[in-house]
Amino acid sequence: MPVINACPPRSCAERSGARSAARVAVALVALAASSLAASIASAGDICASADHDCFTQGGPGCTDLECCATVCAQDPFCCNESWDGICVEEAQTFCIGVSCPTSDHDCLTTGAPGCTDTVCCEAICLVDPFCCESAWDSVCVLEAAQTCGGTIACPESNHDCLTTGAPGCTDLACCDLVCALDPACCALEWDALCVTMAVQLCNTSGCNQTCPADLNEDGMVDGGDLGLLLSAWGQAGCADLSGNGTVDGGDLGLLLAEWGACPSTCPPSDHDCFTAGFPGCTDLLCCTIVCETSPFCCENFWDNACVEEAFQSCGGCGSAVHDCFSVGSPGCSDAACCASVCLVDTSCCAQSWDTGCVNVAIELCGYSGSTCCIPNGGLGCDDDACEGSVCTADAFCCEVAWDQQCASQAAVLCPLVCQGGGSVCLESDHDCFTTGGPGCSDLQCCEVVCAIDPACCSLAWDNLCVATAVPVCGYDGSDCCIATDALGCDDAACAAAVCELDPTCCSESWDSTCATLASVVCPGLCGSPIDSSCCEAGSTPGCNTPSCQNLVCSEDIFCCTVAWDEFCVIQAFKLCGGLCE
């Protein structure tokens, strides 16, 4: 498991030196390990097309995908320009690995060089050779906890959790909570940061922290709590709401002021629900949903497990129409896979599920289908028949790269290979209630329509696609602006103007031609006013002077249904009373 050698701890700080330097080094080790999958994804196309191994000079990249990605993450020149002698040296450093000595202790316990988990040991010693050459000390243990996972056991201690000192503290339950989030507190020292976390994570007083006047912690401040306060009169304890050391009239006033239901369990927060931090998050609704099932997230710490729950409950995971291996709107249909991907890249749940999200999903979620059905980035795919069908339709897929458009075509042309894959929505310049090229601009609507009729995303967004979109996507505009089977439309003035130019719109059906005419002659109803001159040819129908436009279109309807071309301009010169002179 190669990782990037960014700043080995012994070169950043002396062995007995500063805690902060050790923490920086450990963070770099963990960052290198966690970003490896993303590095592989970003370097994948270059590495996959290389024609030489990683220990031979040549063009960009090399044939060992994992080694190639590791080297290029450290030295982008090796994937952008050429795999030169320096890249070969880096490959020898990062990819050959190290030999871990036989050991009698695990990787979370100090002792002789090395540890019993060979994979973890090699990952640590590649970055920090001291751990395999001299001793597996507390820094090695910390690096193992951060890089390989696991929790460092709390060591015996002679100080409480609110006092700085040697690693660990006397309250084992609190110690476990703190060290699960910051292993350094059990490996290096229990410093001020550990104390701060103990205050946040551990209810050292035993009192209700979120609703102090709720003395019996039943979610209400009521007669039961009043009785407890009166029984503690003159004493110290949780009923001392003012904190002056004695339960008295001031505390009675505070309890009465809080009478009724306790406020939300979500504490004030400075971070959103998709970022780890102190308890709670800024989206109150999402916070409440998560904390109802996992109180830890509002009482102790908003950790990665809480973030993952937030993605599943509030981030669109599981509600999207498309699967996790197709681009589309934020999130994907597999809630667990979606949450894992969004932990790596939050934009996948916040903005769109793009090719980068698909690549992360392939790495994290165990994609086992055909490479024809995903944007694999290579030339062609693993099914010869499907590859032939797609590349006959679009040679780009076999000559340049198998991108999302190729995967979309495979879904239509190879239904047995990409069974259930459906078609995917690509970028579009038209809305979902207007005919045009494949797909439409509203990704969520597009996905629903293409799940019903994949041709709408692979061939064209025709009248059938518009007709499907109208009921399923909640169209609320005038039916003058869309194709229908009706005679005329719901706006009498617009219908009259359109039918004057094309009587079939009121005698046969209001088809896409009628809808296009409506967008031209009824701009206030079906779009923005046209700003192109009647005296200049253009690629869109209509022009900016309605009286001239209607005269010309009454002679040549093409000018209002297809494009205002040079013949329309000639008509404008003839019919529009000197407008174009």
Image (cartoon, rainbow, N blue to C red):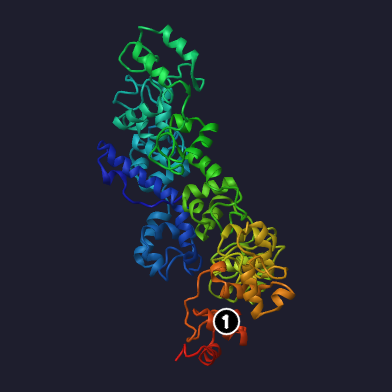
Residue 413 position, x and y percent, is: 69, 69
Picture residue at 42% right of the left edge, 37% below the top: 145
Residue 121: quarter of image? top left
- Answer few, some or many: residues within 10 Å of disc 1's Cα (few below 14, many 20 plus, some between 14 and 19): many
Q: Left or right: where does residue 356 sit relative to residue 456? A: left
Is residue 556 visible in the rendered structure shown here? no
Residue 262, position as x, y percentages in the image? 47, 25
Percent coordinates x, y for residue 442 in the rendering = 56, 61
Circle 1 residue: 550
The residue at 43%/51% (across/down) is 35
| Camera-side residue of 577 and 434 | 577
511, above or below 211, in the image: below
Q: Amino acid at mark 1?
A: Asn
Residue 200 or residue 553, whichever sits in front: 553
Q: Is residue 497 rendered to the left or right of residue 265?
A: right
Is any part of residue 456 visible from this angle? Answer: yes
In percent of width and height, residue 194 lies at 34, 30
Q: Under tag 1, what secondary structure? A: helix
Count of marks overlaid on the render:
1
